[in-house]
């Protein structure tokens, strides 16, 4: 009838788009199905008040047809259809909103496939694969039916046609194959089925296609014959849209396993809907095992994003904060634009609100698990606790208030897990600090010479079994107004006034011995002093303010720091109640050589107990040997 030009701007955009999308070309099907689904929605909605749109609900559907011989793919819906004016208005201008911006983006990133998702270019994506598109449509509001056809190049033609039933049929003539590109896959049943599953599985209307099935030949049981059968390709009702009470644990489990490729059932399912300014449904899972690559670069966190059941993005990582990156799942929101992309996701205000709301829910559900399902929480913590700790020292401690009650440490109370709240709630009133000990195993820590003293006082000690634990408390600084104090810190301040006095006296009495020992160590320690923290052992090393022994050990074991010696300022403490102390007193009166030898051995011994390397192991062994020979 009449051939019309695309608006100049539209034409250029179309051109550029067609020539810049190579790898993501399959999304055209998603776009056309989503338009069909919108049209069905509109028809359903209008039919509530207008009889002209009425139809049996079983008639609301999308049909896909493949014609291999003519290389055509047909997408047909029984939705609202379009009148002549609507055809003009809707399909005559590309990217009606924001076309200038769209062009700019295209010009800037010719190869960027994601840009297609950012703009309302849905319908036109058909031209990525089509050399000709024919739209045949009938609106209930119009007596006549019309076609719109275009090669995408110079313009489009609108004609009046015969089409009795309401709805839209889009016929795509696939482009000819060339050396660079082949379009045959879009004529394969399996490919179309795969794309529908991937992008449109949860569209609310059936997406049907005639598929070829092989059945036994009734006349010859050695043979099969092919028949055509209409099949619904999509599962339509997403699990997350069903009411919680109608879903069994088994359904959740199998859904999770299939969708997220896990062999094991999830440890926790978080399923909820939010209604309000931003409405959405979430179906989230916490895996029951740490994914093997969880702490590596190639682990991809993020949630799947749907809009009204139409798949938008996989692994949308802006929807979950890093410290909850172990959460897997699906978000389906009616309020999101279908044409959202990874780039847009970060800036979109709606998405930010959504992320905030999701984060709150995860937080609440972890808190609930900690409170009401302790065993499970501990299991969860074994898997992902490290990530929560990591969250505390990330971003300079920005999230510490939120996370500090979710972390746990093993402690001297039977090696069990304790939260900081539990620890401070049950500590004796006179206890001034939260005590911790660093070590690579519970055994190692329990053998520390300082532990007996704390046990005696009834003070619980947190076991820092992970090298990062000290960073965590470094960021927290305190909890419930109590400081974190390493049991190997110089000023433990555990003593009563009386005990302090006693130490002072003993120090005074043994001044010469202590000075002689310090000199013997020749600058290796800042001080040799009488210990108030030792119960059973003869000596220990503690660190003065500044670099802790744990830090020294950590850095010594880290190959990155091999050459940079960062050492703690050390203090050697001796136990005045140990027989060795008496021996030292005796020896100091007779032989300064012997005293030096003993002191060296004791110092090295204290280092070894702390897990620190000794300077000269050969020398140490020799001295021990001498001592054995001397012993009578
Ligand atoms: P969007 O879907 O973001 O509006 P599209 O380019 O995908 O942008 O589609 C443009 C418009 O064309 C739609 O808004 C709709 O009005 C109309 N349209 C497209 N496909 C159909 C269809 N199958 N049935 C009815 N209207 C359609
Ligand atoms: Mg669309």
Image: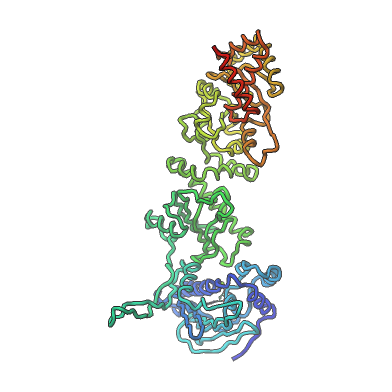
Q: Is residue 61 above or below residue 327?
A: below
Give the colour scheme shown: rainbow
Side of 58 where 569 appears, left or right: right
Ligand 1 position by quadrant: bottom right
Side of 69 where 350 appears, left or right: right
| Quadrant assignment, res 59 | bottom left
Query: Between 603 and 575, which is closer to the camera in this rendering?
Result: 603
Would you say residue 182 is visible in this rendering?
yes
Determine the residue located farthest toward the front in the rendered image.
629
Name the residue rendered at 61%, 70% in the picture.
116
Q: Is residue 4 above or below residue 338?
A: below
Side of 174 where 588 appears, left or right: right
Name the residue rendered at 46%, 58% in the picture.
261
Could you tell me residue 130's position as x and y percent? Answer: 57, 80
Determine the residue located farthest toward the bottom in the rendered image.
1
Could you tell me residue 287's position as x and y percent? Answer: 47, 51
Q: Quadrant of the N terminus?
A: bottom right
Name the residue rendered at 31%, 77% in the picture.
216
Q: Is residue 313 above or below residue 299?
A: below
Would you say residue 168 is visible in this rendering?
no
| Quadrant assignment, res 350 | bottom right
Q: Is residue 289 above or below residue 27?
A: above
Could you tell me residue 17's position as x and y percent? Answer: 64, 74
Q: Quadrant of the C terminus?
A: top right
Query: Between 401 and 556, which is closer to the camera in this rendering?
Result: 556
Side of 65 where 546 appears, left or right: right
Query: Between 480 and 173, which is closer to the camera in this rendering?
Result: 173
Give the mark count.
0
């Amino acid at each position: 009838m009449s051939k019309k030009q695309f608006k100049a701007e539209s034409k250029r955009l179309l051109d550029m788009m067609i020539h810049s999308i190579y790898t993501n070309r399959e999304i055209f099907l998603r776009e056309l199905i989503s338009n069909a689904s919108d049209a069905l929605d509109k028809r359903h909605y209008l039919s509530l008040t207008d009889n002209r749109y009425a139809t049996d609900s079983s008639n609301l559907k999308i049909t896909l047809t493949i014609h291999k011989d003519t290389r055509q793919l047909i997408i047909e819906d029984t939705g609202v259809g379009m009148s002549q004016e609507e055809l003009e208005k809707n399909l005559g201008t590309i990217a009606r909103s924001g076309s200038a911006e769209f062009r700019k983006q295209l010009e800037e990133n010719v190869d960027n496939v994601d840009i297609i998702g950012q703009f309302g270019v849905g319908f036109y994506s058909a031209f990525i694969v089509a050399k000709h598109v024919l739209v045949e449509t009938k609106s209930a509001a119009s007596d006549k039916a019309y076609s719109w056809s275009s090669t995408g190049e110079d313009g489009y033609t609108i004609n009046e046609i015969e089409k009795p039933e309401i709805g839209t049929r889009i016929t795509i003539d696939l482009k000819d194959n060339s050396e660079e590109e082949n379009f045959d896959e879009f004529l394969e049943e399996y490919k179309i089925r795969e794309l529908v599953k991937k992008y449109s599985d949860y569209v609310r209307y059936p997406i049907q296609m005639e598929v070829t099935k092989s059945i036994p030949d009734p006349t010859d049981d050695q043979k099969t014959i092919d028949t055509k059968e209409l099949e619904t390709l999509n599962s339509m009702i997403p699990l997350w849209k069903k009411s919680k009470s109608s879903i069994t644990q088994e359904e959740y489990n199998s859904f999770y396993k299939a969708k997220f490729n896990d062999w094991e059932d999830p440890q926790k399912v978080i399923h909820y809907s939010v209604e309000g300014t931003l409405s959405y449904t979430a179906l989230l899972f916490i895996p029951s095992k740490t994914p093997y690559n969880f702490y590596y670069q190639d682990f991809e966190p993020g949630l799947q994003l749907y809009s009204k059941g139409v798949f938008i993005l996989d692994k949308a990582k802006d929807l979950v904060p890093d410290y909850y990156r172990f959460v897997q799942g699906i978000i389906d929101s009616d309020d999101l634009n279908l044409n959202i992309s990874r780039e847009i996701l970060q800036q979109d205000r709606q998405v930010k609100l959504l992320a905030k709301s999701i984060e709150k829910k995860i937080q609440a559900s972890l808190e609930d698990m900690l409170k009401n399902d302790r065993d499970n929480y501990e299991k969860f913590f074994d898997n992902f606790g490290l990530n929560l700790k990591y969250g505390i020292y990330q971003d300079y401690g920005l999230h510490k208030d939120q996370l500090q009650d979710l972390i746990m440490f093993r402690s001297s109370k039977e090696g069990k897990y304790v939260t900081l709240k539990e620890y401070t709630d049950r500590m004796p009133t006179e206890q001034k600090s939260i005590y911790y000990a660093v070590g690579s195993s519970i055994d190692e820590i329990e053998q520390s010479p300082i532990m007996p003293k704390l046990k005696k006082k009834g003070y619980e000690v947190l076991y820092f079994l992970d090298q990062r634990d000290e960073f965590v408390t470094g960021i927290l600084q305190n909890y419930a107004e109590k400081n974190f104090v390493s049991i190997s810190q110089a000023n433990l301040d555990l003593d009563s006034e009386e005990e302090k006095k006693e130490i002072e006296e003993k120090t005074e009495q043994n001044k010469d011995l202590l000075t002689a020992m310090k000199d013997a160590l020749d600058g290796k320690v800042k001080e040799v002093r009488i210990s108030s923290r030792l119960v059973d052992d003869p000596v220990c090393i503690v660190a003065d303010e500044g670099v802790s022994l744990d830090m020294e050990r950590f850095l010594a074991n880290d190959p990155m720091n091999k050459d940079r010696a960062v050492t703690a300022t050390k203090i050697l403490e001796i136990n005045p109640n140990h027989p060795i102390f008496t021996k030292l007193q005796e020896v100091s009166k007779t032989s300064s050589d012997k005293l030096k030898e003993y002191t060296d051995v004791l110092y090295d011994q204290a280092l070894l107990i702390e897990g620190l390397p000794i300077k000269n192991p050969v020398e140490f062994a020799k001295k021990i040997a001498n001592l054995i020979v001397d012993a009578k």
